[in-house]
């Protein structure tokens, strides 16, 4: 996983970075976690996450 802190990510890009996990697995293990970052843009059709928040979350989850 190599998220770029200067980039914003849509859900399909996050799934691609996580080695192509299924969207249902993403929701089950990450989106339902209370510490997972909230989207910076949340519309019914498009959600965008901040890369810096994703880097922080996955670094903390991996124990770095």
Image (cartoon, helix red, strand yellow):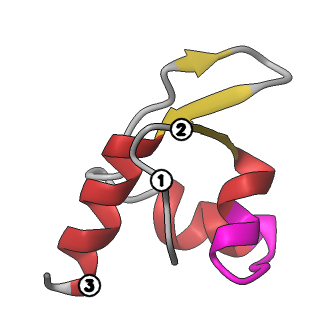
Picture residue at 52% right of the left edge, 78% below the top: 1
The Cα atoms of the two marked residues, 2 and 3, are separated by 21 Å
Does 5 sit left or right of 14 as displayed?
A: left
Q: CA distance from mark 2 to mark 1?
A: 6 Å
- Classed neighbour count for the residue bearing mark 2: other residues with Cα under 10 Å, few (<14), some (14–19), many (≥20): few
Q: Please say if the residues under marks 3 and 1 sit with CB atoms less than 8 Å apart.
A: no
Q: Is residue 18 above or below residue 5?
A: below
- Residue 26 figure quarter: bottom right
Q: Which residue is mark 2?
A: 7
Q: Position of residue 42 (x, y in %)?
A: 62, 18
Neighbour tally class for label 1: few under 14, some 14-19, many 20 plus, Cα within 10 Å: few
Is 53 inside the magenta-drawn segment? no
3 vs 1, front mark: 1
Which residue is at 62% across, 30% downward? 48
- Identify the image quadrant of residue 63: bottom left
Of callouts 3 and 1, which one flags the residue occurring earlier in the amino acid sequence?
1
Q: Earlier in the sequence, mark 2 or mark 3?
A: 2
Residue that numbered label 3 is attached to: 62
Quadrant in the picture for residue 37: top left
Q: Secondary structure at mark 1?
A: loop
Q: Which residues are magenta?
A: 15-24
Q: Nearer the viewer, residue 64 or 30?
A: 64
Q: Which residue is mark 1?
A: 4
Secondary structure type for disc 3: helix
Mark 2 and mark 1 in contact? Answer it, CB < 8 Å: yes
Nearer the observer, 12 or 45 = 12
Q: In the figure, is residue 41 to the left or right of 54? A: right
């Amino acid at each position: 996983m190599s998220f770029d802190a200067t980039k914003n990510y849509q859900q399909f890009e996050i799934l691609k970075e996580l080695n192509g996990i299924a969207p249902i697995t993403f929701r089950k293990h990450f989106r339902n976690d209370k510490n997972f970052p909230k989207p910076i843009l949340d519309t019914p059709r498009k959600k965008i996450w901040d890369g810096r928040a994703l880097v922080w979350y996955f670094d903390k989850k991996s124990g770095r």
